[in-house]
Image (cartoon, grey):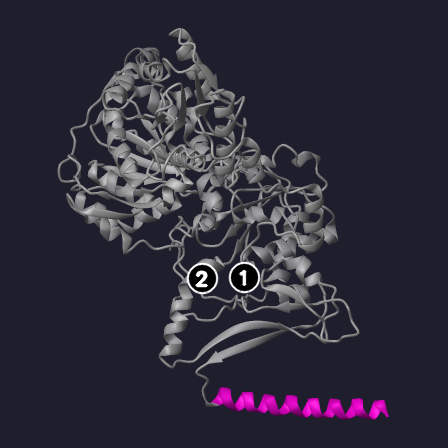
């Protein structure tokens, strides 16, 4: 179950020759793979290509009819290892993952793959999200491409270019016997447009037409073969790649009438460049430019002949390269100086060294470049001062006023998230036992490092929380606490964390949050996926036991863990008792607590259609909601500090003589009960109550409701009489 279904969209993938294909960039990539005769595809979830995996998963019928093999891999390393099928055989393969973090995980397999070289085209589609919208450290894929000698494609973000570069990318890979990176940025993944489709091509080899096993010792990455492979990279593969890029014009030159200057940009930044030139009156919306552009759809390797030809006769060129270090700028400078081309090169001396080149950054940089070129015959609509005036800078005074008026809103857990009660329990236990050192991990639970929980000291990598706590466990007052999700557990945590901890007699506590899905990337399936009871229509924490493919408990026991407990996250008292026992027990070895609770987003996606259907059919459906009595609430807001649920907010006190606002549960409540359970567990105020909302009530429900209304009214009348008597 993913956050979005592409069941209808994938039908477009059957489009034949000459048909107009309309859709998103990720759909265009999938269609291009099928048109290229790909034999196998795989990958691992991660922004901004999570939806590409969802498309592939929803298109399995089409893939199967063509004989294309698809796998949702356990990690990026697993996906990269799939590409070894292209080493000995003419099988085209493609895998996908999230930018640098995924490439880091897959680096061992990729380095070996690049050293061996490939026979069939091998493509890694990386979701590059460098910049302000990124959820990771600010690194780029370019460095790995240079290090491993893998060619890096960065196509212009329009569907015809995206499709053409996929098809040409496989040809480039095979012409140079080298795997390639195909870089897709956020805008490229979700850009919409159209292109003229071609027929899908079934792979030449499949289950009904298998390859003949082929052994090529020279492709094994052991001495003495590795020395020959290293020479081949430079002496044969690189020149072959340069020839192919040049012969097939994969990079593009857009001429302009001001030939004394030029701009060199990567394909992914092309649209932003055109927009900046348009704002200065130097281009139109169709890309017709008056400043010559050299567009690097192949960002690595650089093509010396094309660079020299573009720069020769120009006085100045501007290189637009997001991020640091300035790899492309350094490479271009080297090419030009070796060819004795003395064109003045501007780059990071004008543009920011780090950060995303947004529309405003690009406009200001290009304006500064044209002014620095001292060309009076290049008219600009906006002066540099006018460009800077279009910015909306926020002063320190503005920030102070905003902080005074608006509460901070850090990224947080969803309404009803099963991870919230776990962190509420840890926070309450910390008040009792003193501060903990908590090694956090990648996933939704990393939001607990922010307010209101403020729990977590480090995040080192997906599934690495347990490993990262090993170095300080001997110097802590309590057992080291490590937290990881079920996705991180299966990705890396079982091998790098649990097995290593057992081997090294790590006497710490590992909390594995088992929410049933790869929740942080959209709710995709994982090895411990469970099949929930689809009949259930309430949100009670008590759910029927469900069967899974593989269980986290069994995996931990198989690795040698003796002390394992499974607790429902919504039972805060039981969770506190279990965590307290794990931290204080004298039992040797690793302690594992599996905190179980289904991801609320996926649960809502699953049950809401069932609830709507049941209600429309006239069946009785009961749903829980929670309510805070404004007359009982003291305005302490301890419930909010312990929970942080988005549905738990504040409003004015009904008593005009009291200034403190009261807590309030808004209509987004899903009835998980954490706020009320927290109030009980932490001995807070008794203002919480549960309300059962019943659709299509039966006769018994109506009788109970009538009785309750009458009893409540009797109490109200009695209270009003008593108040009236006290006043006199």
Tell me where residue 428 appears, x and y as whole percent: 69, 56
Q: Nearer the viewer, residue 191 or 392?
A: 392
Tell me where residue 123 appears, x and y as whole percent: 31, 31
Residue 418 in view here: yes
What main secondary structure does the magenta stretch of the protein show? helix
Tell me where residue 393 appears, x and y as whole percent: 62, 41
Which residue lies at the image location 57% right of the left edge and 52% below the top edge? 412
SS type, badge 2: helix
Q: Nearer the viewer, residue 523 or 346?
A: 346
Q: Residue furthest front?
A: 377
Instruction: Give yes or no for residue 411 being in the magenta stretch.
Output: no
Give the residue pinned by disc 1: 416
Above-or-below relation of 174 to 469: above
Q: Looking at the image, tell me whether mark 1 or mark 2 is earlier in sequence order.
A: 1
Q: Which mark is residue 295?
A: none
Left or right of 346: which side holds 155?
A: left
Left or right of 534: which side holds 665?
A: right
Q: Where, quadrant-wise, is the C terminus in this rendering?
A: bottom right
Asked if the residue under mark 2 is in contact with the one under mark 1, i.e. CB atoms within 8 Å, the reply is yes
Q: Nearer the viewer, residue 699 or 96?
A: 96
Q: Which mark is residue 603?
A: 2
Q: State how many labels appear.
A: 2
Tell me the magenta residue range.
700-728
Q: Where, quadrant-wise, is the N terminus in this rendering?
A: bottom left
The CA span between labels 1 and 2 is 10 Å
Which residue lies at the image location 69% right of the left edge and 89% below the top edge? 716
SS type, badge 1: loop
Above-or-below relation of 505 to 728: above
């Amino acid at each position: 179950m993913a956050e979005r279904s592409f069941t209808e969209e994938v039908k477009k993938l059957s489009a034949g020759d000459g048909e107009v294909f309309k859709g998103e960039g990720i759909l265009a990539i999938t269609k291009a793979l099928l048109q290229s005769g790909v034999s196998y595809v795989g990958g691992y979830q991660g922004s901004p290509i999570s939806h590409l995996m969802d498309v592939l998963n929803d298109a399995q019928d089409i893939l199967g009819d063509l004989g294309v093999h698809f796998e949702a891999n356990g990690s990026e390393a697993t996906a990269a290892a799939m590409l070894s099928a292209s080493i000995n055989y003419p099988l085209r393969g493609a895998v996908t993952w999230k930018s640098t973090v995924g490439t880091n995980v897959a680096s061992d397999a990729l380095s070996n793959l690049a050293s061996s070289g490939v026979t069939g085209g091998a493509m890694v589609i990386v979701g590059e999200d460098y910049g302000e919208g990124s959820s990771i450290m600010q690194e780029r894929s370019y460095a790995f491409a240079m290090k491993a000698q893998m060619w890096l494609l960065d196509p212009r973000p329009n569907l015809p270019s995206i499709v053409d570069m996929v098809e040409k990318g496989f040809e480039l890979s095979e012409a140079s016997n080298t795997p390639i990176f195909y870089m897709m940025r956020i805008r490229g993944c979700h850009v919409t447009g159209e292109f003229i489709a071609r027929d899908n091509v079934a792979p030449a080899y499949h289950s009904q037409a298998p390859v003949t096993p082929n052994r090529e010792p020279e492709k094994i990455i052991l001495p003495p073969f590795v020395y020959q492979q290293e020479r081949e990279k430079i002496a044969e593969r690189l020149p072959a790649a340069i020839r192919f890029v040049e012969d097939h014009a994969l990079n593009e030159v857009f001429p302009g009438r001001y030939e004394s200057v030029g701009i060199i940009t990567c394909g992914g930044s092309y649209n932003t460049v055109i927009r900046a030139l348009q704002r200065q009156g130097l281009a139109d919306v169709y890309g017709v430019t008056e400043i010559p552009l050299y567009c690097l759809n192949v960002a690595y390797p650089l093509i010396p002949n094309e660079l020299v030809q573009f720069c020769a006769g120009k006085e100045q060129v501007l290189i637009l390269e997001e991020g640091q270090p300035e790899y492309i700028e350094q490479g271009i400078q080297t090419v030009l100086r070796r060819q004795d081309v003395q064109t003045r090169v501007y780059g990071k001396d004008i543009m920011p060294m780090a950060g995303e080149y947004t529309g405003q950054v690009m406009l200001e940089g290009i304006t500064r470049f044209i002014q620095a070129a001292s060309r009076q015959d290049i008219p600009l609509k906006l002066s540099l001062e006018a460009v800077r005036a279009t910015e909306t800078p926020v002063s320190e005074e503005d920030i102070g006023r905003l902080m005074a008026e608006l509460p901070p809103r850090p990224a947080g857990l969803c309404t009803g998230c099963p991870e919230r009660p776990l962190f509420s329990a840890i926070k309450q236990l910390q008040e009792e036992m003193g501060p903990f050192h908590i090694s956090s991990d990648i996933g939704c639970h990393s939001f607990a490092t922010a307010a209101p929980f403020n729990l977590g000291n480090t995040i080192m990598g997906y599934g690495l929380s347990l490993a990262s706590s090993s170095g300080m466990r001997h110097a802590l007052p309590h057992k080291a606490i490590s937290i990881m999700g079920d996705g991180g557990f299966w990705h890396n945590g079982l091998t790098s964390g649990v097995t290593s901890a057992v081997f090294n007699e790590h006497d710490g506590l590992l909390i594995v949050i088992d929410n049933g899905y790869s929740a942080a990337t959209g709710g995709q399936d994982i090895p411990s996926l469970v099949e929930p009871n689809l009949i259930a229509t309430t949100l009670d924490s008590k759910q029927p036991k469900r069967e899974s493919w593989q269980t986290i408990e069994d995996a931990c026991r198989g690795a040698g863990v003796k002390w394992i407990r499974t607790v429902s996250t919504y039972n805060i008292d039981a969770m506190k008792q279990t965590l307290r026992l794990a931290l204080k027990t004298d039992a040797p070895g690793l302690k594992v607590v599996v905190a179980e609770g289904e991801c609320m987003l996926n649960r809502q996606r699953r049950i809401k259609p069932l609830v709507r259907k049941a209600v429309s059919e006239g069946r009785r459906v009961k749903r829980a909601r929670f309510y805070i009595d404004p007359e009982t609430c003291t305005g302490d807001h301890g419930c909010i500090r312990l929970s942080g649920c988005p549905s738990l907010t504040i409003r004015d006190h009904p008593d005009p003589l009291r200034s403190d606002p009261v807590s309030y549960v808004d209509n987004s409540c899903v009835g998980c009960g954490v706020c009320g359970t927290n109030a009980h567990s932490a001995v807070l105020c008794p203002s919480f109550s549960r309300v059962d909302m019943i659709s299509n009530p039966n006769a018994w429900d109506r009788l109970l409701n009538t009785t309750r209304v009458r009893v409540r009214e009797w109490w109200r009348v009695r209270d009003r009489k008593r108040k009236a008597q006290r006043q006199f």
